[in-house]
Each structure stands twice: as C-alpha cells, then as structure tokens.
Image (cartoon, rainbow, N blue to C red):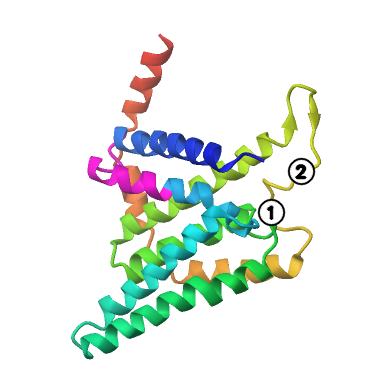
Amino acid sequence: MANFKTHLSVATFASTAFAGGLFQISAVDAVDIPRLIFFGVMGGLLPDVDAENSVPARRLFNSLAFLAAGLILSRQTNQMPAEQLFSYALIAALLVRYPLFYVFRKTTKHRGVFHSLLGALFFGFLVTCLSHWFLDWDNLQSWYNGIFIGFGFIVHLCLDEIYSVNLSGLRMKKSFGTALKLFSYNDMLASGLLLVAVIALMSVTPSAESLGQAFTKSDWKSVGRIGHGLFK
C-alpha cells in the first residue's frame, strides 16, 4: 500500500494534469484550476478514511466539523441572538468531530466498503450535492467538484493496486485485489447500504445538462495539437 506522502504527491500531479487538460480544451477557466486540484487531492486521500489512526480521516472530520458549523452560521443569520447562534454552531462542530468520528472508526474496516469504485461514486455524488444544495455552487461547478473528488479517489485505488504487485519479484502480494474493486465483497450488507445511499444521492444531484454543454463546446482540436507536438 502506498504511504500518505505518495498518495498526496500522485493525487496532486494527476489532478493538476486533469485540470490543466480541461483548461486546455476550454472546459474550465483558469480561476477554477486551484479549486479543482484541491478537490482532486482530497479525493486522493479519502479512501484511507477508514484506516486505523488515519490522518485523512482526522482531517476529513475536522473539515466536516467546520462545514457543519459554517452551515448553521450561514443559514441562521439574523434569526437568533449571536450568542445562541455560535453556541449551536460549536455544538454541531463538536458532535461531528468527536461522537460521529468515533462511530465511524468503530463501524468501518480498512479497505472495506469505502475502498471501492462504489465508494468513489458515493463521495463524488455527495460532494456534488453538498456543493450545489448547501454551498450554493452552480450546477456545472458542483459537478466539477464531484468529478474531481471521484477522480482523485480512483487514482488512490489504482495506486494502491499497483503497490500490491512486487515488480522486483514479479509476484502478487496478499493485498492484491483488495484496493481496486467494485464494492466490498466481504461485507455485502455495507455494500448494499452504500449502494442505496448512492442511488439516493443520484436522485437529488443537480442537472448535468450544463456539464454536457461544457464538453460539447470544448475545443477538442487543441488535444490533437498537443498530441501532434508531442509525437512529431
């Protein structure tokens, strides 16, 4: 299994290349690139949220705690006294960071249901929905956020699978096949519940029409020019 530093480096490189490619075909603006790289890197760390003493898990729940507090502050402005509002925001942050994180650690298994392509879909759709319905991003930007989360997630799975092959001895390690999988074959109940969650999220995602239009109007000829420059 690749370590944290390797996942961070590869996710950053892959996300930068992906965002740069989208910019090259005019599918995104230059101002969008840093944000998309950020989401790609986050996705590249997410599959290890179920690892014991996971750094990505702690950082994820720290972020979720701030997000919970921010949502309360943004949705309740001018509707209650400031002291009460900040108290509710603090309580929400603490509940997410500690009790919810504790339950998550106790009920998940490393390289289990979240370490799968189904997990990539779940987090991709989740971020798309959160971006649109709670953070007020438009349809296109919300989908880009979710796509980069899913992209980074899959990069992580592929990297772990590559590390499951001992190239020097040309043999497979015991961990081969546990990283890049469709779902958790050893926990069908968890996989079934995650599938239900994915379907539920799909039903409330914003329209993808703007995403299709962005790619239809993209300058695909630039891809050919790049390829010609590389191989001439």
**Residue at which label 1 appears:** 111
Q: Given the current orientation, which residue lies at the most extreme top position?
A: 232
Q: Residues within 10 Å of mark 1 (few under 14, many from 20)?
A: many
**Residue at which label 2 appears:** 175
Whole-Å distance between the Cαs marked 1 and 2? 10 Å
* Numbered label attached to residue 32: none
Q: Secondary structure at mark 2?
A: loop
For image coordinates 61% across by 74% down, the residue present is 103
Q: Is residue 140 left or right of residue 11?
A: left
Q: Is residue 74 left or right of residue 158?
A: left
Q: Evaluate whether residue 133 shows in this view.
A: yes
Q: Secondary structure at mark 1?
A: loop
Say what amino acid the circle numbered 1 marks: Arg
Mark earlier in primary sequence (1, 2)? 1
Dot 1 and dot 2 residues touching (CB under 8 Å): yes
Examine the residues drawn in magenta and state their main secondary structure: helix
Q: Quadrant of residue 33?
A: top left
Q: Given the current orientation, which residue lies at the most extreme left position?
A: 78
| Most foreground residue, 154 or 25 | 154
Q: Quadrant of residue 51?
A: bottom right
The magenta stretch spans residue 230: no
Residue 220 screen position, x and y as percent? 34, 32
